Image (spheres, grey):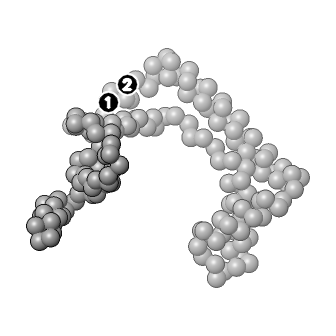
Amino acid sequence: MAKGRASSTSQNSASASASAATAKTTDGRMVLRVRTSQQMKNPAGNKSKMTPKKKKKSSKIDAFKPKKPPTAFFYFLEDFRKEFQEKNPDIKTMRDIGKACGERWKTMTYEEKVQYYDIATEKRAEFDRAMAEYMKRKERGEYQDYEDDSDFDN
């Protein structure tokens, strides 16, 4: 008995980060197998090193590219926020204001939302025109000079 205890305690102390897994042998007996931390990271049992995840390259931000306009909801949010803060000066968190705004937007009829959709479509048309102009200039290579000259390289 003492011999069995000594071997089990030595296994526990030898691998503090190991995990136990049970498996059945061909004759039906249960066998306790100890998994090392490497086996837990790589459960398929491959002995090769695990490949690290590749980092995504961040795309360069083009300073000349037009910014997308907000949606109709955001134009409504501007108006609603002003009204809501006047009526409820004790509520300061954007979370509470956003929840109230979302609930109000859901209950509004299409006729009430039309004014915000009109603003959004006007802004979207302006964005589309600016984007078309931007693409023409980019194709002509007008922005190449600005990209090559960088004060940050010095």
Residue appearing at x 78%, y 64% in the figure: 104
| Residue 99, x across and y down, in percent | 68, 67
Residue underneath mark 2: 145
Quick check: 121 left or right of 1? right
Q: Which mark is residue 149?
A: 1
Residue appearing at x 87%, y 56% in the figure: 109
Residue appearing at x 58%, y 73% in the figure: 93
The quadrant in which the C terminus is found is: top left
| Residue 68, x across and y down, in percent | 60, 41
Q: Is residue 13 visible?
A: no
The amino acid type, in three-letter code, at marker 1 is: Asp
Q: Nearer the viewer, residue 83 or 32?
A: 32
Q: Nearer the viewer, residue 2 or 97?
A: 2
Q: Is residue 85 visible?
A: yes
| Residue 87, x across and y down, in percent | 74, 78
Q: Residue furthest top?
A: 140
The amino acid type, in three-letter code, at marker 2 is: Asp
Residue appearing at x 27%, y 55% in the figure: 32
The quadrant in which the N terminus is found is: bottom left
Tag 2: Cα neighbours inside 10 Å, few (<14), some, or many (≥20)?
Answer: few
* Number of disc labels: 2
Q: What is the secondary structure assignment of the residue under circle 1?
A: loop
Quick check: 69 left or right of 36? right
Q: Which mark is residue 60?
A: none
Q: What is the secondary structure assignment of the residue under circle 2?
A: helix
Q: Quadrant of residue 51?
A: top left
Q: Are marks 1 and 2 in contact (CB under 8 Å)?
A: yes
Mark 1 to mark 2 CA distance (whole Å): 6 Å
**Relative to 115, residue 51 above or below:** above
